[in-house]
Image (cartoon, helix red, strand yellow):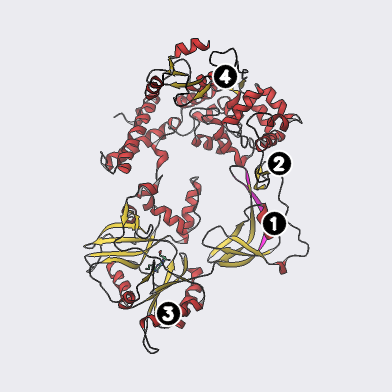
């Protein structure tokens, strides 16, 4: 095999295609059929070669590249594990009374008199995800998630990477031992992971529990290995010989076998002692390095546990005493507006920093305009904030007694704070109600939306610029090479040097990109309109508009006129919402300016009025199949449609003509079955000439 450094771009292109196909096939055999035909090492080598070629030729990265697919579709791909003993859940207690009731209930059930001792093992309730670890002859053989309690997912490979999970037990463990406990992530590790996620452009996790769960369910164990996970052992499933007679002693045995047991556990004898434990752990909660959401009380004696048994899915011998959501009081210093990738304006309260359950909180989401109005949150208000497991805290309520006398209700902006375009709230056509979200209309120029818009602009059904993938768009945008669509067409003129000198780029790849861009300087009106990314205007609506207005001049002139809405709704297939969104777009001077700059770079082809009557194919349903040699499939479709034909994607009785190129397969057979007229490309061109 040629070293990657010696590949020409043509060879690289070819090899990437082969690799994509091969790797997809191995994935299918491995995950779909559980029957791989190559070793893991050989498979890894294929992926590495693919990654190395892509690193050297970033422009050649394919849409179906295997590198886009790491860890995807995880849930379908883990094997199922039937738990030897079900993994149960716990009943909850919230008030002290629930706990005294719990103790009294157990004493009654067991018929204990007032003097009889009843011990409980009390443990913090770790907020992670539970896992079951199976050991045979002291060796870790299988690890599973809880799943629905009866059946979980096999995550053995991932759990092997967790340092608190011994791969081989110490001492003299039972021959078969299933240890159960909680996989969790510490606060520090969680925040550091989220920082890395954000730096890499990935979505941050909402809380340590989600990040632990997400890490454990990675398809690629090397990703799990890079995530700092921990494990506390607190329960068990199948055990061949019971190593101890009480919960407490079992946990001590787990320690001897090499597990980590939570150091805060305590044996208590009365409801009072139990409640004292609850309060102690409650005050320690904020300073613990991991999340807990309560404490768990378990009857200590295993004999008694088995006498008590279960009620449906929870043991009668244990209960979880939950902590209330953590709250604190602070002041709203400002209300900021964040603009998302799709133009949605989200209000965020900037708070005087306050510690809520051990985490410093300085922002709280206010969700939307209605939410602010409902809670009447104002700048200067004292508020109660709450962290209910999630990292993004919420404002529970305003403390009205503390409201400054001069405060005024918050006014939601009607201008996008990022780009200055106007921001609007849509009305739902069916319900007549206003949408909850306010959106910026400055689609083409708003920096908050720019990358998303540019990505859409170059996508397949818009300008279809080869080599302008998401990665390049983001990188060029970050480096200030492109800000709006017109900039793409000026890259070759304004930034040719800068691009040639970028890492992973060179003369050849830069020229290839500029050529690809130049090839798209002429474009059909429908694609052009679709590319603008006007809200609610996709491929289909763009086509309707193009066919109706015929030229970009006619379209823009109509949109600037006062009769715009009336003109739009007169188009078959366009309703009020779409019409308003289009009008909003053209009412924004920033958009018009960006549109003009784009027009200076490209030529937009007019759409000829359909020659419906005179055309031999008007009203006919046609299907293309096989390879077309004289034009692209897209062009063929557009021409057929312009002549009044309907282009369908599959053959049926209703099909009038099948245009079959080389390589035609099942559609051709189908057409012959239905007696549909079949033409080759030349015959078709002659027919419509
Ligand atoms: S005992 C049969 N102990 O809480 C009892 N569970 O609400 C099995 N949890 O699914 C559970 N810390 O994920 C137990 N010290 C602890 C726990 C604990 C956290 C979780 C566990 C379980 C859930 C039940």
Nearer mark to the viewer, of 4 and 1: 4
Give the spatial CA distance, label 4 vs label 1: 53 Å
The magenta region covers 331-344
Which labelled disc corresponds to residue 105? 3
Question: Where does the image place residue 110, in percent across and percent down from the top left?
Answer: 36, 81
- Front residue of this view, candidates 191 and 647: 647
Question: Mark 2 = which residue?
Answer: 422
Compared to residue 267, the image places residue 349 above or below, namely above
Tell whether label 4 touches label 3 (CB within 8 Å).
Answer: no
Q: Residue 596: which quarter of the image?
A: top right
Furthest toward the bottom, the residue is 115
Nearer mark to the viewer, of 3 and 2: 3
Give the spatial CA distance, label 4 vs label 2: 40 Å
Residue 474 visible? The answer is yes
Question: Where does the image place residue 149, in percent across and percent down from the top left?
Answer: 37, 60
- Label 2 CB, ligand 1: below 8 Å? no
Give the spatial CA distance, label 3 vs label 1: 47 Å
- Mark nearer the N terminus (4 vs 1): 1
- Mark nearer the N terminus (3 vs 1): 3
Residue 268 visible? The answer is no
Question: Mark 4 = which residue?
Answer: 644
Furthest toward the right, the residue is 406
Q: Residue 300: which quarter of the image?
A: bottom left
Answer whether residue 481 is magenta in the image.
Answer: no
- Mark nearer the N terminus (3 vs 4): 3
């Amino acid at each position: 095999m040629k070293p990657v450094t010696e590949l020409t771009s043509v060879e690289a292109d070819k090899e990437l295609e082969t690799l994509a196909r091969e790797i997809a096939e191995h994935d299918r055999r491995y995950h779909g059929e559980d029957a791989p035909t190559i070793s893991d090492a050989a498979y890894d080598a294929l992926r590495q070669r693919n990654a190395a070629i892509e690193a050297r030729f970033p422009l050649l990265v394919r849409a179906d590249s295997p590198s886009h697919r790491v860890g995807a579709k995880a849930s379908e791909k883990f094997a199922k594990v039937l738990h030897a003993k079900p993994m149960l859940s716990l009943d909850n207690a919230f008030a002290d009374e629930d706990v005294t009731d719990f103790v009294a209930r157990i004493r009654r059930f067991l018929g204990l008199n007032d003097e009889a001792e009843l011990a409980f093992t009390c443990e913090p309730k770790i907020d992670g995800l539970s896992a079951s670890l199976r050991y045979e002859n002291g060796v870790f053989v299988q690890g599973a998630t809880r799943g629905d309690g009866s059946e979980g997912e096999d995550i053995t490979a991932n759990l092997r990477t967790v340092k608190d999970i011994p791969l081989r037990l110490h001492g003299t463990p039972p021959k078969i031992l299933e240890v159960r406990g909680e996989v969790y992530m510490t606060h520090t590790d969680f925040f550091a992971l989220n920082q890395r996620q954000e730096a890499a452009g990935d979505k941050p996790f909402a809380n340590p529990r989600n990040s632990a769960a997400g890490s454990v369910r990675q398809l690629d164990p090397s990703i799990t290995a890079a995530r700092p996970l921990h494990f506390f052992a607190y329960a068990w499933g199948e055990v061949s010989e019971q190593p101890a007679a009480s919960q407490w002693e079992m946990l001590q045995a787990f320690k001897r076998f090499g597990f980590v047991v939570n150091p805060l556990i305590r044996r208590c004898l009365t409801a009072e002692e139990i409640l004292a434990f609850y309060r102690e752990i409650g005050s320690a909660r904020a300073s613990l390095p991991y999340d807990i959401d309560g404490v768990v009380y378990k009857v200590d004696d295993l004999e008694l546990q088995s006498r008590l048994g279960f009620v449906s899915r929870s043991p009668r011998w244990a209960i979880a005493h939950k902590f209330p959501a953590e709250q604190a009081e602070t002041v709203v210093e400002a209300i900021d507006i964040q603009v998302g990738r799709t133009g949605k304006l989200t209000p965020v309260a900037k708070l005087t920093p306050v510690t809520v359950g051990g985490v410093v909180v300085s922002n709280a989401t206010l969700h939307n305009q209605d939410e602010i109005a409902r809670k009447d949150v104002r700048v200067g208000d004292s508020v109660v904030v709450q962290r209910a497991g999630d990292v993004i805290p919420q404002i529970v309520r305003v403390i009205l007694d503390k409201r400054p006398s001069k405060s005024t209700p918050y006014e939601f902006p009607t201008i996008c704070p990022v780009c200055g375009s106007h921001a609007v709230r849509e009305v739902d056509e069916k319900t007549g109600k206003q949408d909850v979200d306010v959106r910026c209309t400055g689609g083409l120029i708003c920096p908050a939306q720019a990358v998303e818009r540019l990505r859409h602009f170059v996508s397949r059904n818009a300008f279809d610029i080869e080599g302008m993938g998401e990665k390049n768009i983001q990188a060029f945008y970050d480096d200030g090479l492109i800000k709006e669509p017109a900039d793409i067409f000026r890259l070759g003129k304004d930034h040719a040097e800068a691009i040639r000198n970028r890492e992973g780029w060179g003369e050849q790849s830069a020229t290839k990109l500029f050529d690809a861009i130049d090839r798209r300087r002429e474009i059909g009106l429908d694609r052009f309109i679709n590319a603008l990314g006007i809200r609610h205007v996709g491929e289909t609506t763009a086509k309707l508009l193009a066919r109706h207005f015929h030229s970009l001049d006619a379209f823009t002139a109509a949109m600037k006129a006062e009769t715009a809405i009336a003109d739009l709704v007169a188009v078959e297939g366009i309703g009020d919402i779409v019409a308003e969104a289009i009008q909003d777009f053209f009412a924004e001077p920033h958009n018009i300016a960006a549109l003009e700059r784009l027009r200076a770079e490209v030529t937009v082809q007019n759409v000829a009025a359909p020659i419906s009557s005179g055309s031999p194919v008007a009203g006919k349903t046609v299907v293309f199949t096989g390879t077309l040699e004289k034009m692209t499939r897209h062009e063929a479709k557009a021409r057929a449609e312009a002549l009044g034909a309907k282009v369908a994607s599959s053959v049926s009785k209703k099909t009038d003509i099948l245009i079959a190129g080389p390589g035609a397969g099942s559609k051709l057979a189908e057409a012959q079955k239905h007696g549909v007229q079949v033409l080759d490309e030349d015959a078709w061109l002659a027919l419509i000439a």
